């Protein structure tokens, strides 16, 4: 990836779809497909394996279905102004915007009730009828004709977990495909007896109208043969096991060759802007006599520059000196300043280098004074969450999307950690040291505070938006504490 694309402008991606079709692609046919959209299939017959376990039977199948963009890309942007406002989504392109119908987008995970799948047995009786959701940002998206653009700018994956995402971008590059889900919404698996079935798949009317799809271009008919699986121990989730490419050796993710001379913070030019989302996924657990509140926390970058921090190891020590780097509007490096330290964390669940001055988690009393501070005091930066991909300069396809891509090893002499524009770094509920020990706290109202850049060592556009709080209520008895988490403007996550 070039330096230009790293700073690159997401606006290059946005073009309007003409038509779509629901298809299964044959490579030979796809290579000869002219501009436009047609109905195709990987084959007329699909073999499906039935697995049996102690819980009962399940069928696992891949119908080979894809949504393929025509001569122009499909692009949808979903956004909410605040957590008090509803999510609205628009089809975006050179001709302007077209609002998606109510009910098609209810969260940031993609399009709801996109397909209807009807399965009939050999006697013509409907044995299964259900709808599936659709995320256009599939990891295995490919181009389907030789004259299609060589690359796609759209993100990999939709946001299916973080309830406080503000803006998402979903897209399929012109001439590219995106696989669809074959299972009911929520991945609710079901069983079918061994035998022969007919399957009809149709894009639902709201989307046929939105994308101007003729019925013939929105329908697939298949024959499905259900057979006994040859290996019941096989994982049923292999289709969804998308590996992440480790990017330690990409040039743009290598730490600088030498420790920089300490400079001055540029008075003007791009800078990151760190913001905190409300804590989410909050729960209570007890270990013997001790009670803990677990939570997930996300800090994201809404600025005009990535947050880029390089660490340089002190000789013979498990400590690095950290420097924040600055760039001009063209992405050229223009300076660096000290930004604290990085430390080696050898605890289970970590075992990587942590930047020590990124965020802080506090539990506040009802008067907003400190009650407990989380043991989580250091962080490995990674672009784990799509928080708002609709803001200018948002990086839709960041490389360091998990801890393996940017946190180094015990022998590292330097580490580069990056939080790109529009992306968030989430530490989930199961990270060691993150929970609050509430054993000795009385019942009542408390607030989980997520605070970015707590020591002010990082330079950013504004520090007025660094803190978010989430109300919780502790109750119960010493032997069994209880927890209530009020919704935030109707968001219960």
Image: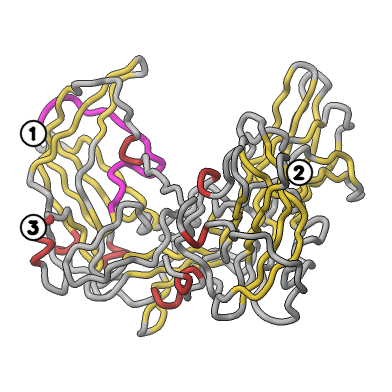
Where is residue 488? Give x, y as percent: 68, 53
Helix, strand or loop at label 2? It is loop
Q: Quadrant of the N terminus?
A: bottom left
The colouring scheme, among rainbow, by chain, secondary structure or one colour, is secondary structure
Cα separation, mark 1 vs mark 2, equals 63 Å
Q: Badge 3 local density, few (<14 within 10 Å), some, or many (20+)?
A: few
Where is residue 398? Give x, y as percent: 48, 59
Q: Which mark is residue 24?
A: none
The residue at 34%/42% (across/down) is 184
Q: Which mark is residue 377?
A: 2
- Within the image, what quadrant is residue 70 found in? bottom left
Q: Is residue 233 above or below residue 335?
A: above
The residue at 63%/60% (across/down) is 258
Front of the two marks 1 and 2: 2
Identify the mark nearer the N-term, 3 or 1.
3
Q: Which mark is residue 28?
A: 3
Where is residue 200? Give x, y as percent: 16, 48
**In the depicted view, which residue is nearer to us: 320 or 34?**
320
Looking at the image, residue 401 sits to the left or right of residue 230; the answer is right
The residue at 57%/40% (across/down) is 409
Q: Is residue 70 above or below residue 477?
A: below
Where is residue 217? Give x, y as percent: 16, 64
Q: Badge 1 local density, few (<14 within 10 Å), some, or many (20+)?
A: few
- Main secondary structure along the magenta-highlighted residues: loop
Identify the magenta region: 179-196
Query: Is 116 included in the stretch rendered in magenta?
Result: no
Helix, strand or loop at label 3? It is helix
- Say which residue label 1 marks: 123
- Marks 2 and 1: in contact by CB < 8 Å? no
Front of the two marks 3 and 1: 3
Helix, strand or loop at label 1? It is loop
Residue 492 seen anywhere in this rendered image of the structure = no
């Amino acid at each position: 990836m070039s330096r230009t694309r790293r700073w690159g402008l997401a606006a290059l991606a946005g073009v309007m779809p003409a038509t779509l079709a629901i298809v299964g692609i044959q490579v030979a046919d796809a290579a000869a497909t002219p501009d436009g959209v047609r109905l195709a299939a990987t084959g007329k017959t699909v073999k499906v394996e039935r697995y049996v376990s102690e819980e009962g039977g399940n069928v696992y199948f891949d119908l080979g279905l894809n949504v393929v963009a025509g001569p122009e890309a499909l692009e949808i942007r979903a956004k909410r102004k605040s957590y008090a406002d509803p999510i609205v989504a628009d089809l975006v392109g050179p001709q302007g915007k077209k609002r998606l119908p109510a009910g098609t987008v209810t969260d940031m995970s993609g399009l709801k009730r996109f397909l209807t799948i009807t399965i009939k047995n050999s006697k013509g009786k409907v044995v299964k009828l259900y709808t599936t959701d659709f995320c256009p940002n599939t990891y295995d998206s490919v181009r389907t004709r030789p004259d299609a653009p060589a690359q796609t700018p759209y993100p990999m994956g939709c946001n299916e977990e973080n309830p406080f995402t503000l803006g998402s971008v979903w897209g399929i590059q012109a001439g590219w495909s995106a696989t669809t889900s074959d299972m009911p919404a929520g991945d609710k698996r079901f069983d079918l007896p061994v035998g022969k079935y007919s399957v009809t798949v149709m894009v639902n009317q709201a989307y046929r109208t939105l994308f101007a799809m003729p019925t013939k271009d929105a329908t697939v008919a298949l024959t499905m043969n259900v057979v006994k699986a040859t290996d019941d121990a096989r994982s049923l989730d292999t289709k969804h096991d998308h590996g992440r490419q480790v990017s330690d050796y990409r040039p743009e993710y290598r730490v600088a060759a030498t420790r920089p001379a300490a400079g001055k913070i540029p008075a003007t030019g791009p800078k990151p802007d760190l913001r905190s989302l409300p804590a989410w996924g909050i729960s209570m657990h007890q270990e013997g006599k001790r009670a803990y509140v677990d939570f997930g926390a996300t800090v994201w970058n809404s600025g005009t520059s990535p947050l880029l921090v390089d660490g340089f190891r002190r000789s013979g020590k498990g400590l690095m000196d950290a420097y924040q780097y600055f760039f001009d509007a063209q992405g050229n490096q223009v300076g660096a300043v000290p930004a604290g330290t990085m430390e080696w964390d050898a605890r289970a669940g970590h075992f990587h280098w942590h930047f020590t001055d990124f965020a802080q988690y506090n539990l506040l009393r009802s008067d907003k004074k400190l009650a407990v501070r989380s043991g989580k005091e250091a962080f490995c930066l990674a672009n784990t969450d799509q928080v708002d991909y609709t803001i200018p300069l948002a990086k839709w396809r960041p490389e360091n999307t998990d801890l393996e891509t940017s946190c180094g090893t015990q022998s590292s002499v330097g580490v580069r950690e990056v939080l790109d524009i529009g992306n968030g770094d989430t530490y989930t509920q199961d990270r060691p040291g993150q929970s609050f020990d509430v054993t000795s706290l009385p019942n009542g109202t408390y607030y989980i505070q997520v605070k970015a850049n707590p020591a002010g060592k990082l330079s950013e556009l504004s520090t007025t938006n660094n803190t978010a709080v989430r109300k919780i209520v502790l109750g119960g008895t010493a032997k069994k504490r209880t927890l209530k988490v009020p919704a935030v403007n109707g968001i219960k996550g």
